[in-house]
Image (cartoon, grey):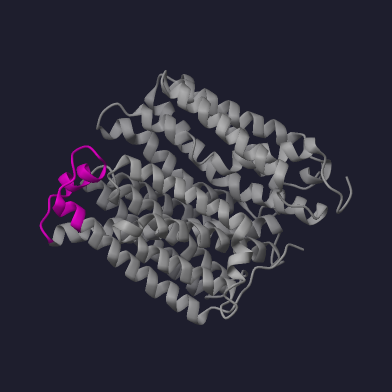
Amino acid sequence: MTNGQPLTTGEKIKQGLVFAVAKLIPIFPLIGLTMIHSGQSAASYMPYILFYTALKTGLLFVNSLGHVQNAFKITSISMVLAAGALLVLAISPWLYLTDMAAFILGASASVIMPTYEGVYYHERVVWKWYLMGTEIKTLLGFSLLTAGGLIIASHFSYRLVFVVIMGFVLIGLMGMQRFEPFVKQPGEAVFVPQTKSVNNLELFIWVTIMAFALRYLRLFEAKFVWQLVLIAIVGLIGLVIRVILTRGMQTNMPAWLLIAALINGAFETFLMLYIFVAVQNKALMIAAYMTYGIGMLLAQVMRRTIQGRFTQLSDLKGQLLGCIIGAWLMMIPYTILLGIVLISFFGSANSILLNHRAYNTGVTTPAQTLIVKYRNTYLGSILMQFILIIGLMGLAALRQQNLAAMIAQISGSVAMTNTTSQLIHLAGLISVGWLTVIAGLAGKYLPAIDENPLT
C-alpha cells in the first residue's frame, strides 16, 4: 500500500468494522443497562448512572496521564478494557462488580472514539484516503446486524445483550490488529514522557463528581447529591483560580477552538437532555433519535455543499447560527424534529471542522490535539447538563413544586402533569436563551474559520 493508491476491498471492510465500533460503543450498552434495573431503587439504576458518568469523564483521566502520541495503542487498550467490562456485566452475580464494570465500560467508550479519530486521521494523511462506499456499507451493515442481534437478545436476558456487544467490540479489536504496520506506530510509547498533569487529574475528579450528581438528579432527589454538586463547584472554582494564578490565561491550543468545542458539546447535550425530559411519546422519541442520526449522516456527505451556499458566512459562524436556529425550533412542538436535524447536522459539521483544525495545530502530538478538543466538548456537555438540570430544579423550588414528584415524572416512573411539562418547557426556553447569547457572542468575536483539508 502506497500513498494515494486505493485500499483493497479487505482493507476497506476492516476500516468499516472498526469505525462502527468506535461510533456505537457509547450507545449499544444502554440497551443492556436499562434492562438491569428492575424497579425504582437507586441501587438498581447505579450501573446506568455510572456508565453515563464515566462516558463524559473517562477521557479526562487519560488526559491526566500525559500527551497521547500512540493513538493505536490507547484505542486497543480501551477496547480490551471495554470487552473485559462487558464480560463482567454478562456473568457477574454481584452488584458491586456490575457497578465497577459499568464505570470502566463508560470510561473506555469515552476514550475509544477520540483516540480512534487519531488513528483514522493518521491513515488519511498517509494514504490520502477517506471513508467511501465499501467502508460506509460495511459500517452500516455491521451496525444493523449487531442492532438486530441486540433486539433478539433483549427478549431473553440482559446478560446475553452484553455478550453480543462484547462480540461486537472484539470483532472491531481484531480488525484493528490487522491494520497496516505504519498505523500501529511501532516503537512509539503510548504517552509523551514527562507530560503527566496533576491539574488534569484533579479536573477529572471534580468533573466526575459533578457528572455523577447531575446524572443521579435526573432520576432521584437526595440531599447528599446536592452536597456533591456543591463540593464539585467549590473544587472546580479552586482549580480554575489556582491555574490562572500560576499559569495565566494562555493556552497552547487556539482559544477559539477550545471555546467552539465547549459550545458544540453544550448544543449536543441540550438536544439529548431535552428529548429525554420533554418528549413523553415513545414513538416521537424514537423518531427524534432517528432524526439525530440522519443529521449526522447528512453532515458527512452534504456539509460542504450546503455551507458553500452561504458565501457571506464562514463555516464556523454558519454552524453556530444553524445550531441556534435548531435549538429555537425544538421549542415548538410542530418543528421539534426539524430543530433536531439542524443541530445534528451543523453540530456534526462543526465537530469535523474542529477536528481538522485541531489535528493540524502542531502544538503537540496530533492524537493529543484531538483529545484536547474532545475533552472540551465533554466539558461543554457537562456544563449544559448543569444549566438545564439545576435550572429546572431551581424553577421548581421557586414555584414550590415537589422535587421528588417532578423527578419521578421526568424519569417516567409516574405520569407527567401539565405543571411539570410547563416547567420543563420554561427551563428549555431559558437554556436556549443562554445558548443563543453564548453562541451569538462567539459568532461575533471568534475568527472566521472554514473547514480545512487534512495535511
The N terminus is located in which quarter? top right
Residue 141 at x, y percent in the picture:
62, 34
Q: Is residue 78 above or below residue 395?
A: above
Question: Residue at the location (55% across, 30% down)?
Answer: 146
Residue located 32% across and 61% down the image: 387
- Residue in the picture at 70% in, 49% down: 131
Nearest the viewer among 37 and 73 is 37
Q: Residue 430: x and y, percent?
A: 28, 67
Whether residue 408 is visible to the viewer of this picture, yes or no, is yes
The residue lying toward the viewer, choosing from 86 and 412, is 412
| Location of residue 210 with respect to 19 vertically, above or below | below
Residue 48: image quadrant is top left
- Indicate yes or no whether the magenta region holds residue 412: yes
Whether 209 is drawn above or below 423: the answer is: above
* Spot occupied by residue 409 in the image (x, y as percentages of width and height): 20, 44
Residue 230 seen in render: no
Residue most toward the right? Answer: 2
Q: Which stretch appears magenta?
A: 399-422
> Residue 381: horizontal and vertical position, in percent?
43, 57
Report the quarter where the C terminus lies.
Answer: bottom right
From the viewer's perspective, tell me whether residue 195 is left or right of residue 244: right
Q: Going by the image, does 419 lie left or right of 257?
A: left
Query: Magenta stretch containing residue 147, yes or no?
Result: no
113 shown above or below 452 = above
For residue 152, side relative to residue 135 (left or right)? left
Q: How many marks?
A: 0
